[in-house]
């Protein structure tokens, strides 16, 4: 099974880096990219990805607001937050929103690989 991923980040350079990295990971496919909350919500509703890699701090609605909105949907993608601001407050907010977790952008490769491996092995289960 292929894990369909929607990437959401307002930093184009980081977005391109993550996309390139994910392109080398077996069992995952980047289905779309968004640079802000409204576009992310529209793409998530249209494409129904399995996982959304979502930046927390963005112009407009934050990633936290996007995740909160999607919680009301009958079927929403799992969310894994990516953030430069890796702190206890954001980790607690991510957990409260039912996110898979939060990965710091500084160490995203090392932190993301085990999470993706777990999700591709057990696609229906959450990993915290």
Image (cartoon, grey):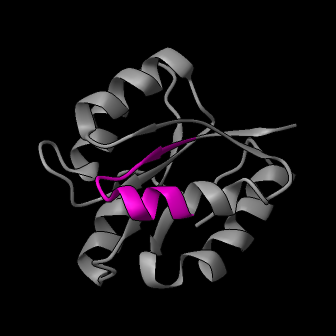
7 or 125: nearer the viewer? 7
Name the residue located 26 percent from the left edge and 41 percent from the top edge: 36
x then y, percent, for residue 128 = 58, 67
Q: Residue at x 45, y 84 (%)?
A: 106
Considering only vertical position in the picture, is 74 above or below 54?
A: above
Horizontally, residue 14 falls left or right of residue 24, namely left
**Does residue 3 appear to the left or right of 14 in the view shown?**
right
Image position of 46 (left or right of 59): right
Q: Is residue 73 magenta?
A: no
Q: Which of 86 and 98 is in front in this view?
A: 86
Q: Which residue is drawn at 54% across and 76% down?
A: 108
Q: Give the range drawn in magenta.
A: 6-17
Q: Percent position (x, y) of residue 83? A: 35, 70
- Taking depth in this image into account, of 5 and 67 the one nearest to the observer is 5
Image position, residue 111 (x, y; %): 61, 78
Q: Can residue 81 be seen in this view?
A: no
User: Taking 2 as reference, is 44 above or below it?
Assistant: above
Q: Give the total number of marks visible in the rendering.
A: 0
View extreme (left): residue: 60
């Amino acid at each position: 099974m292929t894990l369909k991923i929607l990437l959401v980040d307002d930093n184009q350079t980081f977005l391109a880096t993550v996309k390139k990295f994910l392109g080398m990971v077996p069992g995952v496919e980047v289905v779309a990219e968004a640079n802000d909350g409204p576009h992310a919500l529209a793409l998530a509703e249209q494409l129904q990805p399995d996982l959304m890699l979502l930046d927390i701090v963005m112009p407009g609605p934050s990633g936290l607001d996007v995740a909160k909105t999607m919680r009301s949907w009958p079927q929403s993608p799992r969310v894994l937050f990516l953030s430069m601001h890796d702190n206890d407050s954001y980790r607690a907010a991510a957990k409260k929103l039912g996110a898979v977790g939060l990965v710091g952008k500084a160490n995203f490769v090392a932190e993301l690989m085990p999470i993706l491996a777990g999700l591709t092995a057990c696609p229906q289960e959450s990993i915290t």
